[in-house]
Image (cartoon, helix red, strand yellow):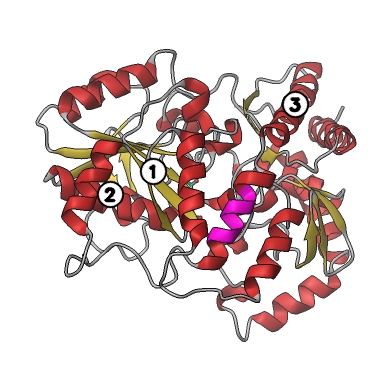
Amino acid sequence: MTPIDRSRLERLTAAETERYVSARPKARALFERAQNSLVGGVPMQWMSEWPGGFPPVMTEAQGARLTDIDGHRYIDFCLGDTGAMFGHSPPAVAAVVARQAAKGLTAMLPSENAVIVAELLAERFGLPFWQMALSATDANRFVLRLAREITGRPKILVFNGCYHGTVDETIVSLEDGIPRSRRGNVGPAFDPTADSRVVEFNDLAALEAALKDRQVACVLTEPALTNLTGVVLPDPGYHPALRDLTRKAGTLLVIDETHTISTGPGGYTRAFGLEPDIFVLGKPIAGGIPAAAFGMTREVGAKVRDRLYGPGTSVAGIGGTLTANALALAAMRATLTEVATDSAYAHMTKLGERLAAGIRAVISRHDLPWYVTQLGARVEYRFQPTPPRTGTEARAGADGAVDRFFHLWCLNRGVMVTPMHNMLLACPATSEADVIRHDEVFGEAVAALLGS
Ligand code: PMP
């Protein structure tokens, strides 16, 4: 664990909190005013996770820069926790959105862009059939239903420590090896251990045992688990074995690339040759406009079509009124053709490498038992000597107090890191100078923490 003097950490955090609060009188006043109209003073519960007692209030964001109501300008490495992974308001998306906004936003009808987007997705990710959703949560909910529907099997399987959005069936974890409704699961609709199986990532024997009775409709997983306190990477050979076991059991494999799309233009799937039956994508796919998509193999697509499409076949539980709206599809098309390009990814990945190298240099300068992971544009550091192999190991490395200190230290010096992780993303507008600034600020934080 972190070789850190806890009383020094507390002192430093108190000083940084004071600095944060006193430099943000307008955000603080708005937060106090909001106590009368927004539950907890924020429009969405997660926003209460920011350190400092209240979040900065955003006024404007462009590229890799975000400005708050108190006039602070940040280098934004959080990028909306991947929603703005291609930079804030990419000019091509902003232009298309403005044009489309004047020509009809939503109509419960397909636009030509729907076909163009599906063709672009098919070409990029290798799966022939596509459907749209409004968020990755939405897409995952639909996919689980479709998998159960077309296989006729009742169960799904996820990995311990997973996060796939606010999807009831997936809010499950292992505690001392026993499946449980995850701690903090808010008003669960049902006991998720009834029909969801959960095993540790990288544990092939447990996976094989859980699939053996052929009751599992699908395995839903990220290629690497990114929603823990530290990324859990697959062991060498894990993905081919996962594919092999799911095929043998007649279980569909759903790969959720919502975060790992940072890996490259075709996600982790294309970079590492994965072969999912269903593929889920959300967050940055429309450059920040709410949208998601899921792709299917020819076989899965045909089964879904034959069962659910056409007059009189609509099924409760799939789709939504605003889903596949004209605005989102115009933004997706612009993102896929003009923003999430090979050259944009080459830049983002190069800067991801630079960010990781800078953090590693500070860690080795101080001989700290911490590690860094990188998935293309995405970099994360944790306070353990080696990356965890399972959700349980990742949880053991959590140190919320140290996280909060880093976040505050960085915010106070104009650098924004993602709360809930120590995660940084490079976007097409991130520069070498931005990375150098992060190196400095991170290095100073570590020196202060160690008293060196
Ligand atoms: N899947 C993964 C892998 C995610 O990380 C997330 C969100 N962090 C989601 C799905 C859900 O995305 P959203 O909150 O945009 O619905």
- Residue type marked 3: Lys
Left or right of 83 in this view: 169: left
> Viewer-nearest of labels 2 and 1?
1
- Part of the protein shown in magenta: 329-335
**Residue 68 location, x and y as percent?**
82, 64
Tell me the number on the disc at residue 144: 2
Do the CB atoms of the residues marked 2 and 3 lie less than 8 Å apart?
no
| Ligand 1 under 8 Å from disc 3 Cβ | no
Q: Nearer the viewer, residue 89 or 123?
A: 123
Question: For residue 234, what is the image quadrant?
Answer: top left
Provide the secondary structure element on which disc 1 rests: strand
Residue placed farthest to the top in the image? 236
Provide the secondary structure element on which disc 2 rests: helix
Q: Nearer the viewer, residue 323 or 355?
A: 323
Residue at horizontal 83%, vertical 74%? 26
- Residue type marked 1: Gly
- Residue type marked 2: Leu
Left or right of 63 in this view: 224: left
Q: Nearer the viewer, residue 112 or 106?
A: 112
Look at the image and tell me in which quarter the C terminus lies. Answer: top right
Majority SS type along the magenta span: helix
Provide the secondary structure element on which disc 3 rests: helix
**Residue 193 location, x and y as percent?**
21, 47
Do the CB atoms of the residues marked 2 and 1 lie less than 8 Å apart?
no
User: Residue tagged by mark 3?
Assistant: 350
Look at the image and tell me in which quarter the N terminus lies. Answer: top right
Q: Relative to residue 211, is residue 281 depicted above or below? A: below
Please tell me whether residue 330 belongs to the stretch shown in magenta.
Answer: yes
Tell me the number on the disc at residue 295: 1
